[in-house]
Amino acid sequence: MRVVLASVAILGAILLITVLFTASVLARARAGEFPGWALALTGILSLLCASQMAVALVNWLATLVATPHALPRMDFSEGIPPELRTLTVVPARS
């Protein structure tokens, strides 16, 4: 449940920042009496730019808010136990 709530909060923040920035750019462009095609082009380009900026901003804020937790230490000094062994296959061209 916490993962779903966190995902909704992150996506909501990204959407909110994107919409606010795009709306402000389009409001200024509309006040400048641009033709319809220029408003559409401005809207599409500002939407792309705003979404990139919003994702970067939310990711940066998430690093400030989230606290890191130490991982448990694993001791393999006497070898890897059979129940933890695995096989790794790396494809190679000959």
Image: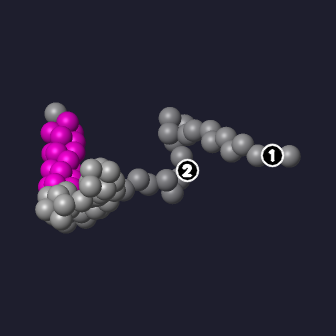
Amino acid residing under circle 2? Gly
Tell me: 67 left or right of 70. left
| Sequence-earlier tag: 2 or 1 | 2
Main secondary structure along the magenta-highlighted residues: helix
On the image, the x and y values in percent for residue 26 come to: 19, 57
Depth check: 72 or 57 in front?
Answer: 57
Quadrant (top left/top right/bottom left/bottom right) for the N terminus: top left
Q: CA distance from mark 2 to mark 1?
A: 31 Å
* Residue occupied by mark 1: 93
Q: Residue at x 63, y 42 (%)?
A: 88
Residue 23 is situated, as x and y percent measured from the top left of the image, at: 16, 54
Is residue 70 inside the magenta stretch? no
Vertical placement of residue 86 versus 31, above or below: above
- Percent coordinates x, y for residue 62 in the rendering: 21, 59
User: Quadrant location of residue 58?
Assistant: bottom left
Range covered by the magenta-colored residues: 2-24
Q: Nearer the viewer, mark 2 or mark 1?
A: 1
Q: Quadrant of residue 4?
A: top left
Q: Which residue is mark 2?
A: 79
